[in-house]
Image: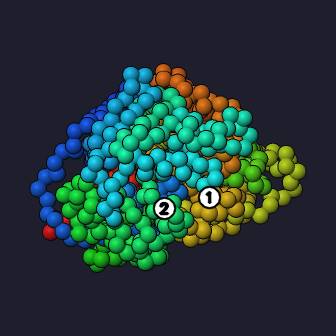
Amino acid sequence: MKRKSLLIILTLVLTVGLALAGCGAKEGKAPEQTPNNENPPTTNEPAPETPSVKKGGEFRLNLHSEPPTLDPGQAQDNTSGTVLDAIYEGLVNVDEEGKIHPGVAEKWDVSEDGLNITFHLNKNAKWSNGDPVTAHDFEYAWKKVLDPKTEPAPPYAYQLYYLKNAENYNLVDNNPNHIDDPNQVGVKAADDYTLEVTLENPTPYFIGLTSFYTYYPLHSSTKDNEKWAAEASTIISNGPFKIASWQHNNSIELVPNENYHDKDKVNLDKVKFVMIDADATELSMYQTGQLDYAGGPTGAVPTDQIPSLQQSLPDEMKIQPYASVYNYIFNNKAEPFDNANIRKAFAMAIDRKNIVEKVTLGGQVPAYGWVAPGLLGAEKTFREEHSESDYFKEDYEEAKALLQKGMEEKGYTKLPEITLIHNQSDGHKKIAQAIADMWKQNLGVEVKIEQQEWGVFLKNRTNGNYQVARSGWGADYNDPMTMLDMWMTGNGNNDTFFSNAEYDNLLKETRTMTDPKARMENFAKAEKILIQDNMALMPIYYYTNVRLVKPYVKGVYIDYKGNIHFNNAYLDK
């Protein structure tokens, strides 16, 4: 499909009408729009009744690899998140139409100034062992994420900085405003079923954000067992499903949580995740009836098979854009990528159009910016209001000149040996090889490629044990902040180790602003610093979800962030 046409579709699919986490849309249908300065559509009414469905059956799909963690406070990846979203529930849920509905909270009150929110919990909400889910479970979980003594440091702690004093409690080093008292953090259980939240600034999308896994509650038993999230037998959860078995590096099986307060809407008898890291094997299992679903977000369809599958299985093959960027990150603290001109040279020396048309084959769009299409701006989408076209262009001669300039600045006569790491996937391998070939042809640089197991890869990337690494990032809520604040100094997800005071100050200022246009102007300035001025990372393309779904699978959908939802799915066979 031509680039212009696809961008139009991308905007229609992804321009969701709320600024919140977990929002999704049916294919070909976009939720109603809500201006960025207004509260998202919410309701204290129960979600609509599900049409007549068939009960029972087992839904089978691929998880691709072992989840690095099933602790909601430690998770930072789609593999872990897919399981967590099935076995846990936050204060609210977001339905397929993108509206907020009660989760553990049956209703909530927001003060006139937007700074105080009181959540009233459903007294029928239970943990999988039958214990009641209380406001104390939320307060404990949120403060544990923010506790500077928590090890390892939760990567998404910054996602809770909307709470009063949260940032100053969490950040210790070089923070003159650090506070030691967790009781000053803006979350408090007034009683077992009332959670009081105080925000630093009015945040229209905060209620929806509580559907994100970092905001999930934790059972009190986790206080006495540091390894509680490592085995099925010690995971007590509160969502529609619970873990029945976990054969590490092999499979995970979920069964309905009989204590879930809305258990009548859970239709499946079982959800089984296999862990197959070979795309061809996953496709074969789908074709032979061993899987009901193949492809993203937790698996992959072989890229070279996509064109033929579109012809042979037109009713089962789905391709859907979503708000996410495929990119390579540079370690800004490691040679030779501690030099901005060298980073710019590498980013300018690849052919993104060639990659999406000849390697990935899934309708992806070349990316030259960081904020994904579809995320809301002041009146339109951010990308419509702030073009990425001026940030940089692919120019091989300019790339060579920048490389030479960077080498002179570093005092190099020859570049150090460079290694590119990526996690296990046939698709990632093909992209890495294509890009390494382009760097060799266009820059004369040899780059070694190293494939690593998912957990090892994440650890190396987080700890800075790399020079160039494959990465991807999707929106957690519908606002450009979800993609920009991760690169602030010291952020738990900032694996580039990029640090820029002007960038940090722009985003800190934006958190206090309510004028939509002024907010978007600040975001645009920050993105320019990130990409045009520093090239802290290398955007490659905007994702699409490519998947195969059996015709009898009903009620499974991919939201605008690319996450899969199957909690109310059923099998019509």
Depth check, front residue: 387 or 247: 247
Amino acid of disc 1: Glu
Tell me which residue sits at (56%, 71%) in the image: 453
Q: Is residue 151 something that shows in the picture?
A: yes
Q: Which residue is mark 1?
A: 151
Q: Foreground residue, 108 or 393?
A: 108
Q: Quadrant of the C terminus?
A: bottom left
Q: Tag 2 or tag 1, which sits nearer the N-term? A: 1
Locate residue 309, reporting x and y percent: 32, 66
Q: Residue furthest left?
A: 52
Specify whether 343 is left or right of 142: right
Q: Amino acid at mark 2?
A: Thr
Q: Is residue 16 visible?
A: no
Q: Nearer the viewer, residue 562 or 221?
A: 221
Q: Residue at x 11, y 56 (%)?
A: 52
Task: Kindly report the distance in space between the C-alpha atoms of the residues bearing marks 1 and 2.
Answer: 14 Å
Could you say which quadrant of the image residue 381 lies in? Answer: top left
Residue labelled with disc 2: 222
Front label number (1 vs 2): 2
Q: Quadrant of residue 434?
A: bottom right
Q: Is residue 535 above or below residue 118?
A: below
Give me the residue at 53% from left, 34% from top. 164
Seen as rendered, the residue at the extreme front is 191
At numbered mark 2, what does the secondary structure look like: helix, strand or loop?
helix
